[in-house]
Amino acid sequence: MDSPMNRYEQQLYSVFKTFDIDNEEALKRSAVLQLCDSLQLEDRGAALVDTLFDRQSDRVTFSQFRNGLLSVLDKDPIRRQESCSSKESVVSKTPSPSSPAQSDDDSPGREAAPKFAFGSKRYGRRSRPHRVAAEDTPRHRVASESRLDSVRARRRMRCKRSSSAMESREEDAAALELDHEQRVDRERALALCRGLDMHGVDRFLVDRVFAASDENEVTVGEFFDRLNASLTNSIETSLDGGVVEGDSKSDSDIVSSDTVVETWKRAGVRKPMGLLLELGFGEAALRLQSLERVLDDELRANSSQMDSRLPLAAYSLSRIRLESVGRLLDVARGERDKLREDLGEANRRARLLAQDVDENHDRIEAELKSRLRQMEARHAEAVRIAAAEAGVERERAAAARSALEEEAARRADTENHLRNEITSLQERVEEYQERATAAEARCQHAEREQSRLQEELRRAEERDAERAAREGAARDELEARLREAREERARLRDRCDELGAALETAGATRSAREGAARSWRDEVDAQAPDSLPDVCDLSLQSFDKKDAQEAIEKLMTFLTNIREISVRDGNGCASCETISTTTETFREALRSSRYEGADTTGHNHVTSRDEAAVQTELEDEQRLGALRKTLADMEHDHRVEKESLTNVIKELETSLELLKTEYEKCEEYWSDKLEEEREAFAEEQRAGDDRLADLAARIADYERQFAPATLPTIDERDQLELQVNQLQDEFDEYRRTHDAELAAKVSHGDDARGGGAAGGLVLITRRLFQSEELRRLHRRLEAAEGASCVCGGAAAARWRAAVWREAGALRARAGRAERAAHRLHARLAAADLLVKDLYLENCRLAHGPRLP
């Protein structure tokens, strides 16, 4: 819809939508015919349909139907007035539309031109209202009293569930200024309706309205909306003739069997109850249509043997049907007359409302004209003040813009400085990360070295324990063998002594027996074998030699084991290499001493071997002591080195922890610092953006204020066109005058180039411009005249050139002032357009319902 509809148009639109089955906002010819029948337009409905479909259109919109309905209703005023005068004491004298002597105010038949036009939408009434005068002399009413008060009492007595009930309810509710948000129940709603004199609304209707919702309480607005919908449905049902007729048929078609029997008795039918039972109708209530159909079948079946009772029964049923139809027809006629009366009353009330609206419209138009003149004066003053404020604001905006540009440059420098600082900090952080990575790598390497040294120390301790165990076992074994060898030597010495004593005894006996032929030594030497010294060497030196050789062998074996242990470990340390070298040297010495002892023979051999054994034993003890000392030194050095490495590892671990802590602190500090700087920068940027947006909005507002406005819509008024023509003539006259003044000014300027023309230029300038700057220019020209009299024409020429430059500047300022005047004129036109919009809005409000 182009504009908001009032409640009557909304009711008509709701009825219109009930026939819009396809929901296309348009109806076909058949649907429009049904709509006219439901509205009981009778012959006017056919005229309306012919009017709407005379342009070869298939469908009709709601706007077309509404306008056509108004035109059709306005073309038949006499008929409506007659129907209204039968019930109301109102006389309406309306001349014929075809009368040539009628005026615009007395011509309701033809369409009235709208008083306002704005765009493509036309406002105002489409026809002029009829002047209705009451039979009795109307009294003078005050401003707060409506002419509808005289007929409202009679209308309230007739609002029995009809359209006038809804209108009365709405107006009375508006008059009482009800609170539409107040919640009411069934009792309060019924009391409210009775307080509004809505006697047609009974408790049953209120219960039906509340039954439609699940709540026990509703607001006043919702209650009246639902009551309005219920009454509208009731009205549509009453207006729908087909539906009423169908319902009446269904109700009138059912009669009691006693009624039929009584009617047949009066008609002279014999045994009516038996006939009814023969036809198969034994119920207490039956349908006349079914009974008639059965009677017709019986009549056709018994055409040859006609029973006299059947025609009488059929005739009686026809009379019953005619009586019921007659009663329905009387009811329909009464309802039709009542609806015609309501329709006439509604038309009369519409005319009264239209007359009220026209009077209010004229009054509002006069008030708006006066207000418009006042607003134009105030607007001119506001434009002058706004121009001054705009200049001040423009200067302030320029200063603010320069300040913002400086602030933006400063922030850009700060941002670059912060970016450089962030880059350097990132480089330092990367450097710290690299150093931390290198420290972690060194720490890991130190930990690996520590584990390796601990493993070597454990292995060395195990080797020392094994070597000490082997040395202890070898020493015990050597001591045991030495003791055994000494015991064996003592035993052999005793045996040797015994054998020597026995030999001496035997020799003495033999020599005594054989004489002194040969001595016993000679015989023993002769009989003894060659190897006797080696076999029977029972001296102490022989046993020492054997023991020394055995000790050398065992020592060689021990040194070989030590060497194998050193080679098997393969550590490659200096102590192990020293031990290996010492062991090898000792083995070579033992080997050479063993070979030397093996080459000697005899007594010398025994002596050197004993000496070598003693010397070897001493050397072994010395070397063993040296080895033990070396081993102790190596253990001490290894322990010291282990402790130093452990201390270094601990220091590295402590340094690593300190570095980690320092790195975390540094990272946290710089992250917090960076976050604070970012937040501060973001806050400053947001504040700057807000100020810049505010400034841009204000600049845009000023630009919109001083920009050339679009051309306003031409108001369809003769006075406005005349004003435009007058303004155009005034502007042309002003342009011609301005061009003439400029031409005169140029011509006088050419004449003033001589020596004595400065006085004429001063007079022209004084006549053209009256501002303070031109007065100062006039004083300077007078000074120039005095200078030309004293010093000649050169100074005067310079002064004239300066004056012409200032005159050019003044012309430029005059052009700017003219452009500013054009902009102000555009703003005045926009303000005029706004005033017209307000005027149209007031007119629309004036056409709405008024309170009494």
Image (tube, rainbow, N blue to C red):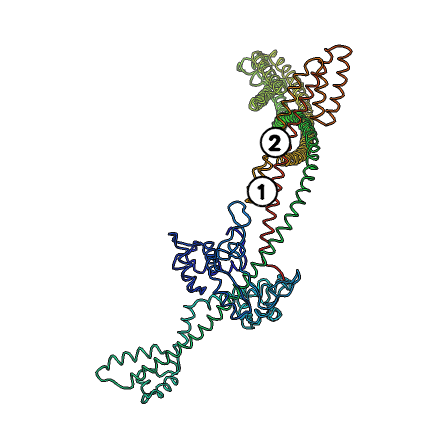
Left or right: residue 220 versus residue 249 is right
Q: Quadrant of residue 731 in the image?
A: top right
101, 134: nearer the viewer: 101
Placement of 172 over or under 323, stated as above or below: above
Placement of 40 over or under 306, stated as above or below: above
| Residue carrying label 1 | 720
Instruction: Indicate which label's residue lies in the foreground, 1 or 2.
Output: 2
Q: Residues within 10 Å of mark 1 (few under 14, many from 20)?
A: few
Q: Quadrant of residue 817 in the image?
A: top right
| Residue carrying label 2 | 733
User: In the displayed image of the protein, which residue is found farthest to the left?
Assistant: 304
Q: Quadrant of residue 725 in the image?
A: top right
Left or right: residue 312 versus residue 730 is left
Coordinates of residue 59 in the picture (x, y in percent): 40, 54
Mark 1 residue type = Leu
Q: Is residue 785 visible?
A: yes
Placement of 48 over or under 256, stated as above or below: above
Pick whichever of labels 1 and 2 is earlier in the sequence. Answer: 1
Coordinates of residue 239 in the picture (x, y in percent): 46, 67
Mark 2 residue type = Glu
